[in-house]
Image (cartoon, rainbow, N blue to C red):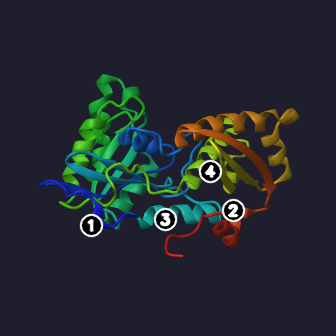
Amino acid sequence: MESLASFPTPPPEFRSGFVALVGRPNVGKSTLFNRLLGQKVAITSPVAQTTRNRLRGILTTPTAQFIFVDTPGIHKPHHRLGEVLVQNAKGILNRVDAVVCVVDGTAPPGTGDRYVAQLLTTAKSSVLMVVNKIDQVSAKDRAARLQAYQALGGWPVYGCSAMTGEGVERLQGAIAHLLPLGPYYYPPEMVTDQPERFIMAELIREQILHHTREEVPHSVAVTIEHMQQQGNITRVNAAIYVERPSQKAILIGKGGQRLKQMGTAARQEIETLIGGNLYLELFIKVRPRWRQDRSRLAELGYRLDND
């Protein structure tokens, strides 16, 4: 990382800080994360609990620098991996300048929303609530839906649509007001602090989620085993880990067609990321019960933040 001395001098009244997006699974946090950044950094899918790692995205405007932190959905965990993800999501609440609680506006508040709101009542950070997917709520029902969610904690409530962009500019302005006066934490042109290998692995996992839906998604992990630049081509070998041989068969598909489709789609996404040509080779490995094994979770990059 560059030293602070090499960063530009911020203008007067410049604001900067860390902003966590939290909420229960499948409320659209990652889609909102990407919308706020103005480009795709976090993977998205219709499958709940898509986000596993805390991902930082950086947005620098003439008046502020936002470091957005996309967190795993807060839910009742059913295995060791779930416990790690939820504990890490909870742990961020007092280590940021602002918390944006994202809820699904297409339904009234539920048990999961109330649980998340209860956690936030003890947070030391400033909180505001975003009622997402507001474009899917009729005009006559919007006010009542916003009031119902505001009643959960009394925080300022903003309706928006991460999908269409409705209300996002107003939301960004509200978040900026919660940030303290501060310096540039990252170079203004930087969009994420995650290494390229991490983003590549996530883009491959995204395609697995899209192509398999509920068949194997939560049993899959992806690591980049080897990456080499040869002329104008980047060669990447990636390992896909599953828990059972039957899951491996699903990913391969008849005659290897599904694996080929996922590889082609992932290659196109990664080429957009790196701005060049990619040769991608995928391998599938079976690791029984890896989600329950603390050492294997650590090997695959999933550990508690204080481990």
Q: Quadrant of the N terminus?
A: bottom left
Q: Residue at x 69, y 34 (%)?
A: 264
List the residue tagged with mark 2. 291
Query: Disc 3 residue type?
Result: Asn
List the residue tagged with mark 4. 201
Upstream in sequence: badge 3 or badge 2: 3
Q: Which mark is residue 248?
A: none
Q: What is the CA distance from the residue labelled 1 to the residue labelled 3?
A: 32 Å
SS at badge 3: helix
Nearer the observer: mark 1 or 2; the answer is 1
List the residue tagged with mark 1. 5
Q: Is residue 197 visible?
A: yes
Upstream in sequence: badge 1 or badge 2: 1
Nearer the observer: mark 4 or 3; the answer is 4
The reply to whether dot 2 and dot 4 touch (C-beta < 8 Å) is no
List the residue tagged with mark 3. 88
